[in-house]
Image (spheres, rainbow, N blue to C red):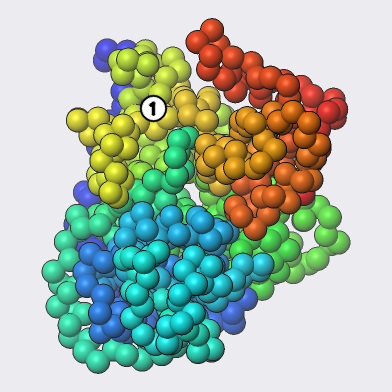
């Protein structure tokens, strides 16, 4: 060995060259009568045979409507049965699924649809305070003049041709989801299309946050997500028995759609959606009702679950449900050792695992195993995943010695094809030798364990949600009273990080923190609105004039500790 930070895990089991459609077919033949999906809030249960039938029906209907292999189909809405069916139907029809954050506002939705040339969107009409159909009308008011059940024409959304809404209403410029699924007139066409889909074809576009500009469209393949989901599930030991999974993470995140849906189908897991979005009380109610053996969550979700359990009165049904867990998996952000310990004690389960990766790697690059010591589980993100390479480099791209911090680079079957329509950004993150730069500072050990010690980039990870400061900065700079603004993350026990804004106002302005909060509401997603706002006269800078965000962050965290000079916006 050279002693340099490089690790290759060749794996003991070969990779599989199959498509998502073939995976669904195999599951339906193997476990036809087993529950595949259960939506507690919708009161719907779907078996594996029904899952295949519904995916085939919707896939054939979308082709009948006019979509063709390679077209982009967006899905917008909270966790639901039809979200999962849409994902699988798109894969069977050769479409590329574009997963959209249900917290998006109109400007974010417009960008996401246009960036990748979405041809059709399947959306809920409303969710919480969001009205997705009204957002589309806000983006292009001329849609209100177009009849329902028609192919639309929009100068603002030039690629979009079909709007499909999950509603009983007849809406202008839109099809009803219930009508679309009845349009299939030739499933043989779907079968012909499915047979010609290649494992290396793109299947999904995941919007990935960055530190500059808008989200980037990571393009993933059937081959990448199927094998990644399989080997992550193998580390979790899903193969040992039939599991019932509490899937409380959002489906639009790669955590939910790959490690939840794809892994679930691969291992014949019964996937249970406790609610449309995460609420600790909703998850606890589902834990009482279902006999879960596995659960997924972000560290923030687990923090909220543990808090809710402590506050709840003794409940024999809940305690019985908590005692049945055999697998607890955490991803989306690095989990603290204390939280790991609390999770293991509360669930009486020693098999608490970390999953680490990024959207661009389909997503898992490190996972812990059941054989890992408690120290390894709590101090690292696990060991390099099967069939993957990792190296840690300095600022010049040269490997550093084991145990030395540097940027983690990844290579293997799971890395994305590209950022859709953005060759420049693709070249920035991917080297000619196909190494993908993570932007994370990592320490790698000689036996393949990784420890994340920081980030090269300024991404704020709030509750597992990646937030890029520049987008919020660009938005707030439109405020007439703001002269200069910088966004960064500050440590938070529950969320991991909270968004902080340091703002320099124009002379004579009397704008308050509440004014800034109200300005943001309804215009950017709620999780991007700064929690902490500080008004400053100037900013710390380097000799060359660059803003020192780390200095701002340090100042803010000290002041937060003293509970001084801050307004908290809820």
Q: Residues within 10 Å of mark 1 (few under 14, many from 20)?
A: many
Q: Nearer the viewer, residue 418 or 414?
A: 418
Mark 1 residue element: strand
Vertical placement of residue 215 versus 267, above or below? above
Vertical placement of residue 59 versus 440, above or below? below
- With 199 as the anchor, is 86 left or right in this view? right
Could you tell me if residue 107 is visible in this image?
yes
Residue 466 lies, in percent from the top left, at: 53, 43
- With 482 as the anchor, is 261 left or right in this view? left
Q: Nearer the viewer, residue 536 or 423?
A: 536
Q: Residue at x 79, y 24 (%)?
A: 559
Could you tell me if residue 342 is visible in this image?
no
Q: Residue at x 15, y 72 (%)?
A: 195
- With 522 as the anchor, is 333 left or right in this view? left
On the image, which quarter does residue 287 sit in? bottom right
Residue 338 lies, in percent from the top left, at: 68, 35
Vertical placement of residue 311 versus 197, above or below? above
The tally of labels here is 1
Residue indicated by mark 1: 408
Vertical placement of residue 282 versus 350, above or below? below
Residue at the extreme top of the image, as rendered: 543
- With 313 as the anchor, is 216 left or right in this view? left
Residue at the extreme front of the image, as rendered: 508
Residue 84 lies, in percent from the top left, at: 43, 70
Residue 384 lies, in percent from the top left, at: 37, 35
Q: Residue at x 18, y 79 (%)?
A: 191
Question: Which quarter of the image is occupied by the N terminus?
Answer: top left
């Amino acid at each position: 060995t050279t002693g340099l930070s490089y690790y290759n895990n060749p794996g003991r089991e070969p990779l599989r060259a199959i498509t998502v459609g073939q995976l669904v077919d195999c599951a339906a033949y193997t476990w036809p009568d087993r529950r595949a999906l259960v939506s507690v809030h919708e009161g719907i249960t779907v078996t594996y045979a029904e899952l295949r039938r519904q995916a085939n029906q919707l896939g054939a209907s979308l082709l009948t409507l006019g979509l063709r292999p390679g077209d982009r189909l967006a899905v917008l809405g909270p966790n639901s049965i039809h979200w999962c069916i849409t994902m699988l139907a798109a894969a069977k029809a050769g479409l590329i699924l574009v997963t959209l954050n249900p917290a998006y506002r109109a400007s974010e939705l417009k960008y996401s649809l246009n960036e990748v040339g979405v041809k059709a969107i399947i959306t809920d009409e409303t969710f919480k305070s969001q009205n997705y159909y009204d957002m589309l009308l806000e983006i292009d008011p001329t849609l209100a003049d177009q009849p329902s059940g028609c192919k639309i024409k929009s100068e603002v959304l030039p690629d979009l041709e079909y709007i499909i809404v999950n509603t009983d209403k007849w809406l202008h410029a839109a099809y009803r989801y219930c009508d679309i699924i009845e349009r299939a007139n030739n499933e043989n066409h779907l079968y012909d299309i499915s047979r010609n889909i290649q494992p290396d074809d793109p299947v999904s576009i995941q919007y990935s946050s960055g530190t500059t500009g808008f989200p980037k469209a990571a393009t993933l393949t059937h081959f990448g997500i199927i094998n990644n989901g399989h080997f992550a599930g193998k580390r979790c030991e899903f193969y040992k028995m039939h599991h019932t999974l509490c899937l409380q993470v959002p489906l639009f995140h790669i955590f939910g759609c790959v490690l939840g849906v794809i892994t679930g189908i691969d291992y014949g897991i019964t996937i249970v959606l406790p609610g449309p979005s995460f609420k600790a009380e909703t998850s606890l109610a589902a834990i009482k009702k279902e006999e879960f053996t596995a659960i997924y969550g972000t560290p923030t979700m687990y923090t909220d679950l543990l808090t809710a359990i402590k506050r709840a009165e003794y409940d024999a049904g809940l305690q019985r449900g908590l005692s049945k867990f055999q697998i607890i998996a955490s991803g989306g952000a690095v989990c603290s050792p204390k939280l790991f310990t609390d999770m293991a004690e509360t669930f009486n389960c020693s098999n608490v695992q970390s999953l680490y990766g990024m959207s661009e790697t389909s997503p898992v690059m490190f996972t812990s195993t059941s054989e890992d010591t408690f120290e390894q589980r709590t101090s690292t993100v696990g060991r390099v995943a099967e069939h993957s390479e990792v190296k840690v480099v300095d600022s010049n791209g040269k490997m550093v010695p084991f145990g030395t911090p540097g940027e983690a680079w990844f290579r293997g079957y799971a890395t994305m094809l590209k950022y859709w329509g953005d060759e420049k950004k693709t070249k920035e993150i991917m080297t000619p030798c196909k190494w993908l730069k993570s932007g994370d500072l990592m320490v790698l050990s000689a036996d393949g364990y990784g420890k994340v010690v920081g980030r090269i980039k300024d991404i704020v990870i709030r509750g597992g949600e990646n937030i890029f400061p520049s987008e919020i900065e660009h938005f707030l700079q439109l405020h007439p009273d703001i002269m200069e603004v910088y966004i960064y993350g500050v440590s938070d026990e529950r969320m991991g990080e909270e968004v902080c804004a340091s703002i320099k106002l124009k002379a004579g302005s009397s704008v308050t923190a509440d004014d800034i909060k109200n300005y943001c509401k309804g215009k950017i997603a709620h999780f991007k609105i700064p929690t902490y706002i500080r008004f400053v006269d100037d900013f710390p800078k380097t000799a060359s004039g660059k803003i020192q965000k780390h200095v701002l962050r340090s100042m803010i965290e000290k002041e937060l500790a003293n509970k001084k000079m801050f307004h908290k916006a809820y």
